[in-house]
Amino acid sequence: MKRKDFILKSIGAGVLAGSASTFGSFSSAFSATRSSIPYDLVAVRGGGAAEMFDRGMAELGGMSQFVQSGQSVVIKPNASFDLPPERAANTNPELMGRIVEHCLEAGASRVRVFDHTLDGWRESYSRSGIEKAVNDAGGQMVPANSEGYYQEASIPNGRRLTETREHELLHESDVFINVPVLKHHGGASVSIAMKNMMGNVWDRRYYHRNDLHQCVADYSTLRKPDLNIVDAYRVIMRNGPRGVSEEDIVTMEAQVISPDIVAADAASSLMFGLQPQDVGHIRIGEEMGIGTMQLEDLNISRIRI
Amino acid sequence: MRNRVLKISRVVISLLFLVATGFLFLDFTGTFSSSLINGITWIQFVPSLIKFINLAGFLALGFLVVIVATLIFGRVYCSTVCPLGILQDVLSYVSKVYTTKIRKKRVRYRPSSPKDLLRYSLLAVTTLFFLSGSVFLLNLLDPFSLFGKITSGLVRPVYFGVNNVMADIFQSYGIYTFYHVETRSSTFLPLIFPSIMLGLVVWLAFTRGRLYCNTICPVGSFLGLISKFSMYRLEIDDQLCNHCAQCSLNCKAECIDLKNNEIDFTRCVGCFNCLDVCSKQGIDYKNQWFPEKKISEPVTEPFFMGEPEPESNRETVPVNRVEVSDISRKPDNDQNFGRDRRSFFFQIVAYFVGFSMASRLVKANVLQEDDIRDDLDVEVTQPSTIPEVKNYPVSPPGSLGLQHYTDTCTACQLCVSACPTDVLQPSFLEHGFTGMMQPRMDYHASYCNFDCVLCTEICPTGAILPLTMEEKHVSRIGLVHLELDNCVVKTENTACGACAEHCPTQAVRMVPYQDGLTIPEIHDDHCIGCGACEYICPTRPYRAIYVDGIEHHDEAVPPVFEELDYEEPEEDFPF
């Protein structure tokens, strides 16, 4: 137990210091570049989803801080629902297209996008508008509908979730970008970056059966995105994560970008109107040293367009 | 020459029908539009007949075209349109190549006497059942539905397997153009019957040509009765025939008796093999209604025969498309008509109705299978304790209710093949013995997509009637049941909300519980019975939330769209 604590604490410290993830198969090549980014977190408000992303990334020093020439990129949006962009259950397609463009401009060898959808995957990919946006921008949608696409992964630091099967692209790609949409969630209070990674794995029911918040946090100890981009352009405020009608939605015109998944979740949940410590997996995330929700300790850039 | 052309056009058209119909049951990419699918199935005799009776629609007249065609040319349906018949021809062809090329034998078919007792008994029983309102025997014997059962149940998994191997090969090169597909059937039981029938069809086709069509198939026997009176019937010309016996040896129906120079036209499937092989034009169609005054000469016949036959085939397809798309445009009228007409039919013989009713009310509980093929395996830490109580199977949206559905569905499996979410699965005995293999909504395999009406658009028999998207959104096919004593929020005191997450109408919603947790609450007036909650509920062996079928589909209350009470916070960045 002591040894585990030590590991956890040192990891926590490492993240706080702004260094890269030090475990998981994602031992990143970006430790050096990551520490050189000017801000720990960028929050943008008052523009289109793509426009806010352009501004935010400029603030962070551009996508080349995260993607180097020749590297392969995998992006995980929320494309889980057979619903159109106006219903805000899926990540904004315009934003997705722009992220792909940024990656390719930074010299990415290929940019691939997947989500283990809740609704039918072909319907969801297409209806969300993400398929078209990604293809038009030069990226590629990859199926995630069959267990064959998933590979075993063990989670040494997991408390309830100690092994799982995650999408093979996460093992094959050099850079992992997590692009959740901020929204209400009936079970998990709010769904942001950590929760979005439930679409990385094959067996979602296990989470629900074995303490949802803990499992979400457990998985985040294994898979740490190189960058989290929280789309809060349109936000489902109730009846989430699916929503019933456009009445459930507020056009918030916001975006949060950070390599620290817990910080991104904390800032986004505050925008949503929830205290981060009231959201189980965010609280546990900090406890387990995945990142920090102490936003006052971070160097944050706030941009109002 | 003319006969050659006749045969070749027959082969080409029949292969087109076989490939197109086969593709309907194999395709998983949604290539064909609903109206094209309807166009292809429009001419299929039994589905069209049932649809006609159901809708009292003058648009489902494909069967009438078949009857008229039979009345003029004999059973051309059997050799050009019927997919099961054409499948047998393909098998016969294989057997022919095997016999002549490999075993170097010449004799293939011998004339045989008709199995009248068997074929007409089967036809009579099938008709009796049908008139009494039960499609049970058509479910078992209709050639189109049987072809569907075989293709969907047995060929499709192979097709998927080949696709998946291709997908794997491409995937290893980082190409994801092909993708994995899986059947989600949880049991092999519904495949027993198609397997037996496929075995029978293959065996008979290999050894005896079209014996199946002339003995077992009720459509073949029925059209055979009509073709007794066809205008054009094949006849042997005693003067031209030199008794070379080629026609008889090549007759798949084994119906040419050269001893008496007679043809049993009730068994002739109109394959034109005899015409093709006869070098003397000693066998040919003769107008039996208005016979030629003088002894017929081959010269006069092209006028009658050469032209109309292929033309009639060519015409049928375009006619389809127009008419069937009309159906989908006017679902309301047709449905109302259908109900009246339907009740007339199945109240004729109460005995059979009672029989099929009794067998339908099988408790789904008793038949519930294990989760053999569950999409996601669930590790159970603490098994749930309260058994689910299900009384009825769930029939697809647009099927009005169990009565209408089970009385009109011939279990062709077209909806099963087309369903994008795979929630439609062949049943085994959930719909009762007489409803064998009629598809059911299997919420352990998947759930019904809120924004999808595909099955309602393509059902060839009208068992599933067309729904608009607006109608579908409030069409209730089952009702949700919640057992909180199975729910993880209560039993484990941890967060979940999977059911509410999947519910498209918020008939299940999460309400405050304890320790900051939320727990499901059902508002069943909004429930449409799509099964999403049951599908995703993680508790085992019993689910905390599930959908039970209802006898009669009804209308759910649409979700309430309340205005959102949201105040823009003063700060842009509350951190």
Image (cartoon, coloured by chain):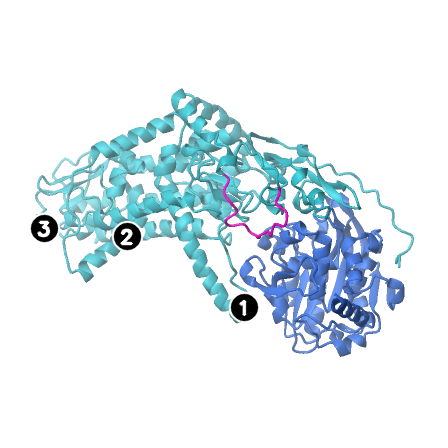
Which residue sits at x=80%, y=40%?
Answer: B563
Badge 2: how crowded within 10 Å, few (<14), some, or many (20+)?
many
- Is B186 above or below relative to B53? below
Subunit of mark 2?
Answer: B
Three-letter code for the amino acid on which mark 2 is drawn: Leu
Three-letter code for the amino acid on which mark 1 is drawn: Ile
Q: Nearer the viewer, mark 1 or mark 3?
A: 1
Q: Are marks 3 and 2 in contact (CB under 8 Å)?
A: no
Which residue is labeled 2 in the image?
A: B91
Residue B315 seen in the figure: no
Which residue is labeled 3 in the image?
A: B244
Badge 2 element:
helix
Cα separation, mark 1 vs mark 3, equals 59 Å
Residue B332 seen in the figure: yes
Q: Nearer the viewer, mark 3 or mark 2?
A: 2
Three-letter code for the amino acid on which mark 3 is drawn: Cys
Q: Nearer the viewer, residue B539 or A271?
A: B539
Q: Residue furthest right?
A: B570
Same chain check for tags 1 and 2: yes
Cα separation, mark 1 vs mark 2, equals 37 Å
Q: Nearer the viewer, residue B263 or B526?
A: B526
The magenta segment:
B368-384
Which residue sits at x=15%, y=51%?
Answer: B278
Q: Which numbered disc, 3 or 2, marks the residue that appears first in the sequence?
A: 2
Subunit of mark 1?
Answer: B
Give the label on residue B175, or none.
Answer: 1
- Image coords of residue A226 (percent x, y): 73, 69
Instruction: Describe residue A93's horizontal placement relative to residue B248 as left or right.
Output: right
